[in-house]
Amino acid sequence: MAESYRVVLDWFAAHPHIVTKVALGSLALAVVSLGLLVVAVSRMPADYFVAGTVPRASWRDRHPLLRLVLRVLKSLAGLVLLLTGVVLLFVPGQGLLTILIGVSLLEFPGKRRLELAMARERHVLKTINWIRARAKQPPLIVEPLP
C-alpha cells in the first residue's frame, strides 16, 4: 500500500505543472459552483417541494431553437454541479447541497422523489434555509415523510 502512495507522490513531483493546473481548475470550479448554488437556492420558490407540480419555467415558451440551447446549457450546468457535489463529498464543502442543485437542473425519471429525499436531509435543509435567509427569502417548505 505504501508503495502505491510513493508512486503517486513521485508522479506529482515529476509533473508539477499538471498538478497546478488541476488544482487551479478545481478551485475555479468550486467558486463557480458555489455562486450558482447561491443563485439557484435563492431563486427557488419556497413551496417548490410541496406544490403538486413543478413551476413551469418561462424559457419553455420561447422559440424552439432557443429552448433547445437553454435546455442543453441547463443540463450541462446540472451535470457540472452534480459532479462537483460528488467531489465535495470527499473534500470540505457542501457536497449534498451541490448535488441537490445539480439534480434539480437535470431531467430524468424519479428526479422529483430524489430531490425531495435530499432536501429532507437535516443539514441540507438547514443550509438551504440559511442561504435563503441571507438572500431575504422565506425558508423552504418541505413536507415531512408520510
Image (cartoon, rainbow, N blue to C red):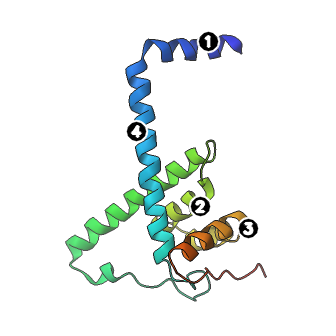
- Report helix, strand or loop for mark 1: helix
**Image location of residue 93, percent across then percent down:** 59, 50
Q: Amino acid at mark 2?
A: Leu
Q: Residues within 10 Å of mark 2 (few under 14, many from 20)?
A: many
Distance between the alpha carbons at the discs numbered 2 and 3: 11 Å
- Judging depth in this view, the residue of 77 and 26 nearest the camera is 26
Q: Residue at x 42, y 32 (%)?
A: 22
Q: Earlier in the sequence, mark 1 or mark 4?
A: 1
Distance between the alpha carbons at the discs numbered 1 and 2: 34 Å
Residue under pointer 2? 97
**Image location of residue 12, percent across then percent down:** 49, 18
Task: Answer whether labels 2 and 4 touch (C-beta < 8 Å).
Answer: no
Residue 24 shown left or right of residue 126 in the figure: left
Q: Amino acid at mark 4?
A: Gly
Task: Answer whether labels 2 and 3 touch (C-beta < 8 Å).
Answer: no
The residue positioned farthest toward the bottom in the image shown: 52
Q: Amino acid at mark 3?
A: Arg
Residue under pointer 1? 6
Q: How many numbered discs?
A: 4
Instruction: Point out which mark residue 25 bears.
Output: 4
Q: Residue at x 48, y 65 (%)?
A: 38
**Image location of residue 52, percent across then percent down:** 57, 89
Q: Earlier in the sequence, mark 2 or mark 4?
A: 4
